[in-house]
Amino acid sequence: MEGKDIERRIPIGERPPEERIKDFEEVCLGYTKEEAIAEAKRCLTCSRPLCVEGCPVGINIPAFISYIKEGNFPQALEEIKKKNLLPSICGRVCPSEYQCESKCVLGKIGAPIAIGALERAASDYGEENHLCEGNSPSHSVGRVAVIGSGPAGLTCAAELARSNIEVVVFEALHEFGGVLSYGIPSFRLPRRIIQKQIETLKAMGVKLEKNILVGRTIPFRDLLMKEKFQAVFIATGAGLPQLLGINGENLEGVYSANEYLTRVNLMRADQFPRYGTPIKRGKRVAVIGGGNVAIDAARVALRLSAEEVYIVYRRTEEEMPARRVEIEHAKEEGIKFLYLLSPIEIKGNGEKELVCKRMALLDERDASGRRKVRETEEIFNLKADVIIIAIGQKPNPLIPSLEPTLRRGKEGEIIVDEEMRTSLEAVWAGGDIASGAATVIMAMGMAKKAAESIKRYLGVT
Amino acid sequence: MAKITRKEFLAQDIVLLEIEAKRIASNAQVGQFVVLMPYETSERIPISLHNWDQIRGTIQIVFQIVGRTTSELSTLDVGDYIYTLLGPLGKPLELAEYGKVVCVGGGLGIPPIYNIAKGLKEKGNEVISIIGARTASLLILEELIREASDELITCTDDGSYGRKGFVTEALRDLLNTTKIDLVIAIGPVPMMEAVANLTRPMGIKTIVSLNPIMLDATGMCGVCRVKVGGQIKFACVDGPKFDGHEVDFADLRRRLAMYKEEEAKALEEWKARI
Ligand SMILES: Cc1cc2nc3c(=O)[nH]c(=O)nc-3n(C[C@H](O)[C@H](O)[C@H](O)COP(=O)(O)OP(=O)(O)OC[C@H]3O[C@@H](n4cnc5c(N)ncnc54)[C@H](O)[C@@H]3O)c2cc1C
Ligand SMILES: Cc1cc2nc3c(=O)[nH]c(=O)nc-3n(C[C@H](O)[C@H](O)[C@H](O)COP(=O)(O)OP(=O)(O)OC[C@H]3O[C@@H](n4cnc5c(N)ncnc54)[C@H](O)[C@@H]3O)c2cc1C
Ligand code: SF4
Ligand code: SF4
Ligand code: FES
């Protein structure tokens, strides 16, 4: 590959917007084998690969890409799986543009390698050879309880099962996967992909039990005392939705994003009334927030046949924490972005009015490097019949509230040391419960560290 | 999947189910509830625990057939399985020595009053229960509640059994003659509100059990939010028991009516299908 070609990324196949907004099928089609090989060939196989530094689980990126260059997808997948047991999920939802891809040297002269898309291709085409099938532990060398079946819980379980440790995963909801199942819509992450990962875990001998809210169905202390687990990993996520605390927030048709997304993703309200869970299908929908959660809620609203969907964000596009590709997808689908607006009240019923203060952008930056904003006196009203609040989630408070000796931080997160140990003996924590709302790959990275530490604790190598 | 081991119609459209649920039975505490889905296509609905048996590993719930999901639940028979059952949920009632306690149960508030009265009495409190229903045939579980209490007052709106009138009237008479330390009221929202309005000027501590719409019931969605003392609380994890004098009942009533149209449609669709 020569000259200009190396600067340009092979485009990734997507369904046309007018077609995809009619259903919940996957938007991104991913690379074909040929496209993946062509994209892989752009990689310089750097001897000091910067991209790897950007990956929270340290995948040997040049190595797996080299296998793709040769068309050896199963081997590429095998290479990824050394570090990441959920590649079909990460390849789809990892904010790679902020992580591995942001470090890729090619980014200096053109587009960085599409590492995430190649990871997805490896998992899409590598599975055919059944290289990733797990095997049941031949003999058990310890017994560990994992609380929560989101990416952190699943990763920790898989890592432990690989070392012949008996693992039981407890999940409160009636489906496994955590946010992957109830939060992220199927047009970004099809349910069959999650299902398959769960099946693989089961094949590895991991026991998964649903409808168990640890702290209530099983007292937390019973896990170590009565149920004879030697260690516990808490991976209960950041499921507590934050609200605005403004007047009108309790009106009908005002949702937290968690409620809105759960009704559709977990309860299938898009298929109401065949499925019994209802949802308000607004004609004009306003979503408040600027992260992935807000974008997901907006795109779901569109697929529930809303005519107009607005994202209302208090800063500007530059500060939006959502993935760039999702913002682009949302725009293509016709979602309108309103910036520098901060809601102060919701008025009316049925047809409502979202009353906002106009914000002014300042030159000053906050700790995260984003420009600060200030309220102005200008008022902006937006008519909407459904309003969705997506301004963040806090760590799940249930277990910490029942275990006062479990040390917690200011935001309610469980405090852990560098090995993910909590203040309690034999108890680890990781993922969003320890970091606050973050990302799938960060949760997995923490879970892997915890698994290593648990193995050392159990004397397993 | 949880197996139904007993089914009994206590009155027209009021069903008692006994369900195998070892873990719930061994960890249930007074005043808690469960969330269930009769079928895979059902909504998740909350129902209070009425009774449980640690040794047999079973729980009992009592529900009224009102809409789609409770109709679905009523089609399941002994030996059938409930698709999803999660519990025990909510903060348990604190079992302290309060002194003289009145437990007021109206309609479908009667079944959960049973374990509360029993728990409080076992703790050494003197428990007077007042139960009421629209008419005699709907006044369920009288004998059980009597056993669990030191004294029982029964009322029917139409006077067909016991005292004629609302439970609040019986409660008012009692409060006028007896010194009461705590009132617990469970039942329809207007009844709980009336009780709270009655006891507020008397300064008698009153606990109500709120029944907002729920979804996950693990504190994740916020649909169950209620206003208590000017603050937003999630009833499924912060409640469902709250200080009745602090509850914004008007807000609760509005939120409960949110899906009226959709509920009618869901029931219709289901009836057409079966
Ligand atoms: C709508 C949405 C979109 C997102 N999009 C992206 C994205 O594109 N890319 C990305 O990287 N990240 C994204 N994220 C963030 C990412 O999903 C989370 O960071 C990640 O899921 C955290 O994983 P976790 O395992 O820590 O927790 P979770 O995924 O939250 O899982 C926790 C699980 O624990 C269960 N649980 C809680 N308490 C108990 C208990 N007491 N007993 C038993 N079970 C319990 C919960 O039911 C849940 O299933 C998104 C988040 C949301 C909400
Ligand atoms: C903590 C708690 C304990 C309860 N205990 C009992 C009990 O012991 N026995 C009993 O018969 N009922 C109980 N309920 C009420 C019961 O949940 C509702 O009757 C049931 O959800 C109605 O569902 P449906 O589909 O049959 O009727 P629908 O026609 O869908 O609804 C009828 C009414 O029930 C309420 N409701 C609807 N969906 C929900 C939902 N998902 N969650 C909560 N309420 C809803 C609404 O006010 C609605 O107007 C309790 C509710 C709560 C919150
Ligand atoms: S897991 Fe995420 S950060 Fe790591 S290589 Fe894959 S896409 Fe990049
Ligand atoms: S930095 Fe970029 S070019 Fe270099 S190895 Fe990583 S992906 Fe390939
Ligand atoms: S029912 Fe979802 S938070 Fe209470």
Image (spheres, grey):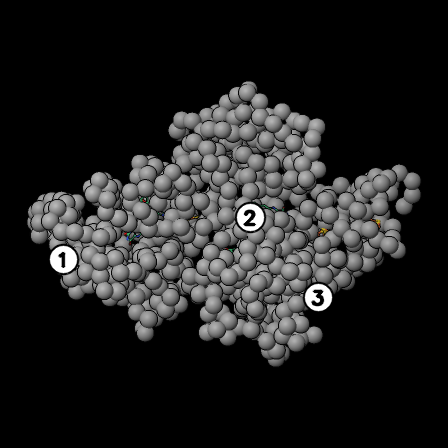
Q: Residue A129: percent from the left, percent from the top? A: 71, 64
Q: Nearer the viewer, residue A360 or B46?
A: A360
Is mark 1 in CB contact (under 8 Å) with mark 2?
no
Q: Nearer the viewer, residue B239 or B54?
A: B239
Per the image, the residue denoted by label 1 is: B152
Spatial separation of the CA atoms under disc 1 and disc 3: 69 Å
Q: Does residue A22 appear to the left or right of B165 in the view shown?
A: right
On screen, residue A187 above or below B89: above
Q: Secondary structure at mark 3?
A: loop
Q: Which mark is residue A411?
A: 2
Q: Nearer the viewer, residue A117 or B234?
A: B234
Mark 2, residues whose alpha carbon is within 10 Å: few (<14), some, or many (≥20)?
Answer: few
Residue type at the position of mark 1? Leu
Is the residue at mark 3 from the same chain as the one at mark 2? yes
Q: What residue do we see at 40% from left, 50% from top? A: B238
Q: Nearer the viewer, residue A182 or A345?
A: A345
Q: Does residue B147 appear to the left or right of A302 in the view shown?
A: left
Spatial separation of the CA atoms under disc 1 and disc 2: 48 Å
Q: Secondary structure at mark 2?
A: loop
Q: Does residue B220 appear to the left or right of A195 in the view shown?
A: left
Residue type at the position of mark 3? Leu
